[in-house]
């Protein structure tokens, strides 16, 4: 009697970790290998204290349909050999969709964690993944009331939807290093608290053309020229793109490092004067850490951080540099205001709720007893 938790990428490990702990020995981790390497998965499993997953043959590097098809076939075999009582998927990756389809094909109850996000940007494969998964899931765990409203607007029956909060709140609280360790971390990178920018860039819209990537890196370079340190942990996809487009000169003034472990990333984000990122997870984490964020994206499926005053959406060009300069100029007032603003992502008990709802879905007669 196990609950299969399907994983494929770094954010899934991060966000599902508290739920996996909550499920205890009932959790059976299956990793599709979508993004499987030491820096992006192996280290996260250890840091988040997760058990070794069943690792399917890696599907990274293939085109999207091939990834989904290969993962689906392998998950189907895994679920046939040892049938779980429920399947949990999170977010919007190809692994999420493959896990959802595999559960659906075998008639196994499907739980979607972080349901109801919508960017309404049909150019994003993630938008298609989340819409498809939401429409076949049996239990949709929406992080916020607005996410639940998106689901109702698509006529998904209310009885399938629960507002649980986002597990990011508890994972950040648990993984954030102590003040002493954060101090040591900042010394290691020679950074002064509240005086540096921490940036991440990896989405296709910012890395798939020389113009877009050049525009983002050009603005980070401008911030560094104006005298603010910019730390950039470089995602493997972005590193490859920088080389492909011969943009290494734009990195010269930046402090470029390998992708960071999760606790180190949080520790450094906690004291950044400003975050600049196209990541989904960072849009949520900034609200728990109380730090301002410029989201370098065309659209966002996470309007909560913008609405609560933590974040603003900017295009990769001069708008990014101009707003960064503005926000850095009134940094102290902004940081004080954000420190007093609650996160819109819930109370830090999302994983308990999701575990309870999953148990009720998987073994209804036990839950009723
Ligand atoms: N992250 C990390 N180290 C880094 C950069 C990011 O641990 O060097 C974390 C970040 O805090 C967030 C997650 O990785 O929780 C985001 O992953 P990614 O940006 O790949 O995916 P997305 O959130 O956009 O789906």
Image (tube, grey):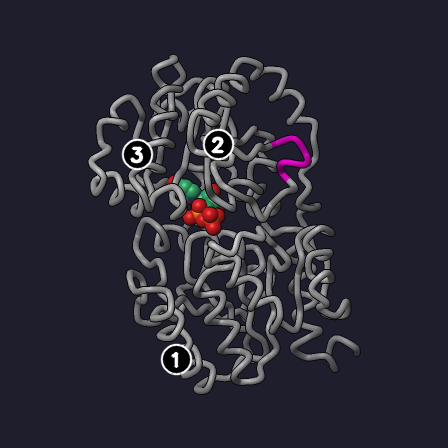
Spatial CA distance of label 3 from label 2 is 14 Å
- Which SS class for mark 2? helix
Ligand 1 within 8 angstroms of badge 3 C-beta: yes
Q: Count the numbered circles shown.
A: 3
Give the class, few, some or many, for how many residues have Cα within 10 Å of label 2's Cα (few <14, many ≥20): many
Mark number for residue 73?
1
Reading the image, the residue beneath label 3 is: 257
Is residue 172 or residue 250 the one in the foreground?
A: 250
Which residue is under mark 2? 269
Kind of element beneath mark 1 = helix
Cα–Cα gap, marks 1 and 3: 37 Å
Q: Quadrant of residue 214?
A: top left
Quadrant showing the C terminus: bottom right
Q: Residue 18: x percent and y percent?
A: 56, 55
Residues shaded magenta:
305-310
Compared with residue 184, is residue 299 higher up or lower down, i.e. above or below? below
Do residues under tags 2 and 1 come within 8 Å of each other at their CB atoms? no
């Amino acid at each position: 009697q196990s609950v299969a938790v399907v994983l494929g990428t770094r954010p899934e490990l991060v966000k599902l970790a508290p739920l996996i702990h909550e499920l205890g020995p009932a959790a059976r981790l299956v990793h599709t290998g979508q993004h499987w390497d030491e820096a992006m998965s192996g280290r996260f499993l250890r840091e988040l204290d997760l058990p070794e997953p069943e690792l399917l043959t890696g599907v990274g590097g293939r085109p999207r349909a091939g990834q989904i098809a290969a993962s689906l076939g392998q998950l189907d075999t895994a679920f046939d050999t040892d049938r779980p009582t429920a399947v949990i998927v999170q977010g919007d990756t190809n692994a999420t969709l493959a896990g959802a389809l595999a559960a659906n094909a075998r008639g196994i109850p499907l739980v979607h964690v972080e349901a109801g996000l919508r960017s309404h940007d049909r150019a994003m494969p993630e938008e298609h993944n989340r819409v498809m998964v939401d429409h076949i899931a049996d239990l949709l765990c929406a992080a916020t009331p607005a996410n639940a409203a998106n689901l109702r607007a698509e006529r998904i029956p209310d009885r399938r939807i629960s507002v649980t909060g986002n597990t990011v709140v508890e994972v950040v609280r648990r993984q954030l290093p102590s003040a002493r360790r954060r101090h040591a971390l900042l010394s290691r990178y020679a950074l002064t608290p509240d005086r540096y920018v921490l940036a991440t860039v990896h989405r296709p819209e910012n890395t798939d053309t020389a113009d877009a990537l050049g525009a983002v890196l050009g603005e980070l370079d401008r911030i560094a020229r104006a005298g603010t340190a910019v730390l950039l942990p470089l995602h493997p996809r972005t590193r490859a793109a920088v080389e492909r487009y011969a943009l290494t000169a734009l990195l010269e003034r930046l402090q470029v490092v390998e992708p960071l472990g999760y606790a180190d990333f949080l520790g450094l984000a906690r004291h950044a004067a400003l975050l600049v990122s196209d990541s989904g997870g960072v849009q949520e984490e900034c609200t728990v850490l109380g730090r301002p964020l410029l989201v370098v994206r065309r659209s966002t499926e996470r309007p909560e951080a913008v609405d609560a005053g933590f974040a603003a959406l900017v295009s990769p060009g001069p708008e990014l540099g101009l707003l960064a300069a503005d926000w850095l100029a009134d940094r102290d007032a902004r940081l004080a205001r954000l420190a007093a603003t609650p996160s819109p992502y819930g109370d830090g008990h999302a994983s308990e709720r999701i575990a309870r709802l999953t148990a009720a879905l998987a073994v209804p007669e036990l839950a009723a007893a």
